[in-house]
Image (spheres, helix red, strand yellow):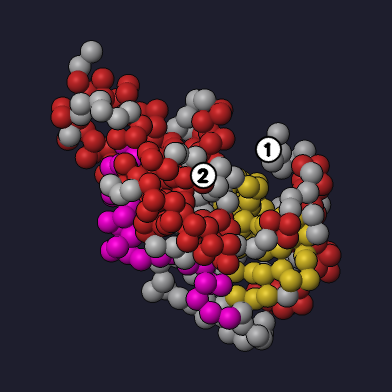
């Protein structure tokens, strides 16, 4: 076995979980892939000097953490619109863009599944990757993010985290308490986001897709919580409350039946949609990746990432079929989430 083959066999199986780790730290799937590449490049360069005093996994995480901490120092945090200001009061006001902001991105689940053959390992990589959680992580300092992810998500012992970060167990435990307290202020209460049973969630998402595809604002309103929020990065404008959200969506999206097609996807370990918009020529072109937060009392949040570039990360085509008249209500067999 060559040195290259030995390196690949010992390190390759950790790529998926390192990708999820770097995404949690940076909030960007694009940057996470770049940082994992940098991690493996640094590991390869120093492989000859690896003495095995720690496991290969711990060694790789130490390199990845240093790479991420440096990147965060240079680039800062990646917010959602709600992290930058109050909701827009008038849904009929012009929408304001924020092209200068480095926005939080969704994470495509296929990036995890493609890297790991062990289902248990895939489940571990998906733990703690929900969009609301990653958005809340952006409020923490770089060091706090690392401590909280390693301790609470990956469940590393405090002593192991201290060794990786070059600090003490006392400092790790103290930093973890502060990080948990700050995260609690940024995250909704767990009971507010309690998820429905799988059949109920699937049925609600089917109704959501039908309402959007059929431009039925009334049907959409029935699925939303009274305190629902709508965010649409890279737009700075965001809306809170069922009335404002439905009015905004009706004005800008639900203008014509059949104008939009919703294709199921998985993002951040939760059901999502790739939205295609019909162009004048009849074909549907990539428009947005939409991640809804589904609770037992309805849809609590809709984050629609208006970036066709994301479709490549999700392995989705930029064009989807052609117009074929009115869009019928979705068939429950068409969108097989998590089956």
Mark 2: few, some, or many residues within 10 Å (few <14, many ≥20)?
Answer: some
Q: Main secondary structure of the magenta part?
A: helix
Q: Position of residue 234 (x, y in %)?
A: 49, 69
Comparing 287 with 279, the one in front is 287
Q: Position of residue 16 (x, y in %)?
A: 43, 36
Disc 2 vs disc 1: which is toward the camera? 2
| Rendered residue at 55%/56% (across/down) | 133
Disc 1 on helix, strand or loop? loop
* Displayed quadrant of residue 120: top right
Q: Is residue 275 left or right of residue 330?
A: left
| Rendered residue at 30%/49% (across/down) | 167
Mark 1: few, some, or many residues within 10 Å (few <14, many ≥20)?
Answer: few
Q: Which mark is residue 338?
A: 1
Disc 2 on helix, strand or loop? helix
- Is 317 magenta? The answer is no
Asked whether residue 315 appears in the rendered view, the answer is: no
Disc 2/disc 1 C-alpha distance (Å): 22 Å
Comparing 44 with 244, the one in front is 44
Q: Which mark is residue 153?
A: 2
| Rendered residue at 36%/66% (across/down) | 76
Read off the magenta span: 60-86
Q: Is residue 91 left or right of residue 74?
A: right
Q: Position of residue 224 (x, y in %)?
A: 77, 65
Comparing 171 with 35, the one in front is 171
Q: Quadrant of the N terminus?
A: top left
Comparing 310 with 236, the one in front is 236
Q: Is residue 338 above or below residue 116?
A: below
Asked whether residue 58 appears in the rendered view, the answer is: yes
Pointer 2 or 1: first along the chain: 2
């Amino acid at each position: 076995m060559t040195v290259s083959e030995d390196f690949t066999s010992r390190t390759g199986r950790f790529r998926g979980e390192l990708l999820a780790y770097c995404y949690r730290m940076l909030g960007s799937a694009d940057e996470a892939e770049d940082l994992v590449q940098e991690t493996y490049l640094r590991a390869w360069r120093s492989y000859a000097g690896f003495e095995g005093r720690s496991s290969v996994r711990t060694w790789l995480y130490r390199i990845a953490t240093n790479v991420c901490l440096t990147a965060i120092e240079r680039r800062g945090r990646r917010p959602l619109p709600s992290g930058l200001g109050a909701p827009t009061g008038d849904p009929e006001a012009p929408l304001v863009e924020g092209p200068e902001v480095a926005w939080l991105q969704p994470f495509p689940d296929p990036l995890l599944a493609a890297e790991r053959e062990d289902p248990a390992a895939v489940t571990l990589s998906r733990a703690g990757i929900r969009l609301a959680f990653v958005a809340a992580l952006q409020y923490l300092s770089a060091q706090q993010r690392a401590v909280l992810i390693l301790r609470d998500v990956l469940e590393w012992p405090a002593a192991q985290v201290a060794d990786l970060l070059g600090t003490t167990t006392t400092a790790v435990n103290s930093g973890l308490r502060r990080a948990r307290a700050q995260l609690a202020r940024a995250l909704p209460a767990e009971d507010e986001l309690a998820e429905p049973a799988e059949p109920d969630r699937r049925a609600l998402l089917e109704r959501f897709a039908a309402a959007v595809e059929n431009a039925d604002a009334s049907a959409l309103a029935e699925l939303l919580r009274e305190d629902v929020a709508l965010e649409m990065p890279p737009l700075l404008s965001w809306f809170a409350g069922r009335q404002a959200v439905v009015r905004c969506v009706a004005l800008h999206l639900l203008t014509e039946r059949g104008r939009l097609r919703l294709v199921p996807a998985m993002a951040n370990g939760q059901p999502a949609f790739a939205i295609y918009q019909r162009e004048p020529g009849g074909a549907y072109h990539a428009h947005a990746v939409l991640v809804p937060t589904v609770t037992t009392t309805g849809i609590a949040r809709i984050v629609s990432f208006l970036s066709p570039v994301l479709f490549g990360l999700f392995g989705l085509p930029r064009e989807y079929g052609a117009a074929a008249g009115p869009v019928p209500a979705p068939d429950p067999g068409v969108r097989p989430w998590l089956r």
